[in-house]
Image (cartoon, rainbow, N blue to C red):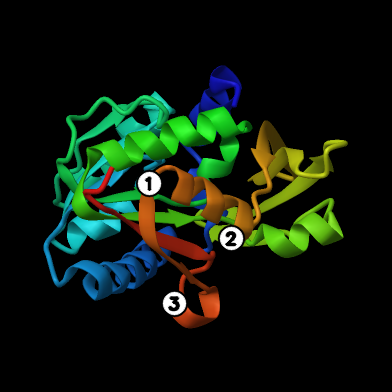
Amino acid sequence: MSESSTRDFYDELARDYHLIFRDWDASMAHQAQVLDELLHSRLGPGPHRILDCSCGIGTQAVGLALGRHEVVGSDLSPLAAARAAAEAAARGVSLPATAADMRQLPFKSSIFDVVLCADNSLPHLLSAQDLQAALIGMRRVLRDDGLLVITLRDYDDARLAKPTATPPQVSETPDGLVINFQLWHWHEDGERYDLEHFQLTPAQNTWNVRVRRTTYWALTRQQLTEFVTEAGFTSLTWHTPASSGYYQPVLTAQRTSSR
């Protein structure tokens, strides 16, 4: 991962990230409900102390905080982290959020019940070394038997089909329609791709076009399973969108006290 380029991507997107969703508040509420059910099934009813280590503007963290969990946020983008804290405060809950690289989490060991890394954030790490650094750090801050929760795109089919674009997502705003879509430029290794995110916003009789660029590693489920196991997690379970109701595949795993 190029730290500066990924941070710049999300710094530039922080103000407008909610426009990716048709209804951001409804999406927050739904995602929090699904994640809360997963936490309940693995750890009991809670409330739980949760680190969202890729919190962005708070899409998961705010909803979980509204559900009475004690949530701490961190994100590579200082602008996104600041907005997450502000969005939580506007809704009457506390969300301490700080700018931090998930490969170097600035938290004490064994203090969280849950570490959440959602919204396809982990695949910004483009090497095995960076992935291991992040996963070992996540394990370090979890208590014994604490739960790791990772969500990412379903790349198993994408690695075969090599899509070059995503369908347009249209959202209604008070200022008019907003259109989002992505172009994917695959690397020669067939595993990584450069993404161009296009966002069209209305401007009188024309459109403002914003283009932001970043890079991903299209990790298959088997690859991520191996990395998470190597980092010392056990009881790995994949939850499909059909079974969980979440919009991406979800991997849950637990820290054991054996390492």
In front here: 185 or 235? 235
Residue at mark 1 to residue at mark 2: CA–CA distance: 41 Å
Q: Amino acid at mark 1?
A: Gly
- Quarter occupied by residue 207: top right
Question: Relative to residue 211, is residue 119 drawn left or right?
Answer: left
User: Percent from the top left, x then y, of residue 75?
Assistant: 38, 33
Quarter the C terminus occupies: top left
User: Percent from the top left, x then y, of residue 67?
Assistant: 18, 64
Residue matched to label 3? 244
Residue matched to label 2? 171
Does residue 215 appear anywhere in the picture?
yes
Residue at mark 3 to residue at mark 1: CA–CA distance: 25 Å
**Residue occupying the far bottom of the picture:** 243
- Quarter occupied by residue 4: top right
Under circle 3, the secondary element is helix
- Circle number at residue 174: none
Quarter the N terminus occupies: top right
The mark nearer the N terminus, 3 or 1, is 1
Circle 1/circle 2 CB separation < 8 Å: no
Does residue 12 appear anywhere in the picture?
no
Residue matched to label 1? 232
Q: Residue at x 40, y 34 (%)?
A: 80
Under circle 2, the secondary element is strand
Tally of marks? 3
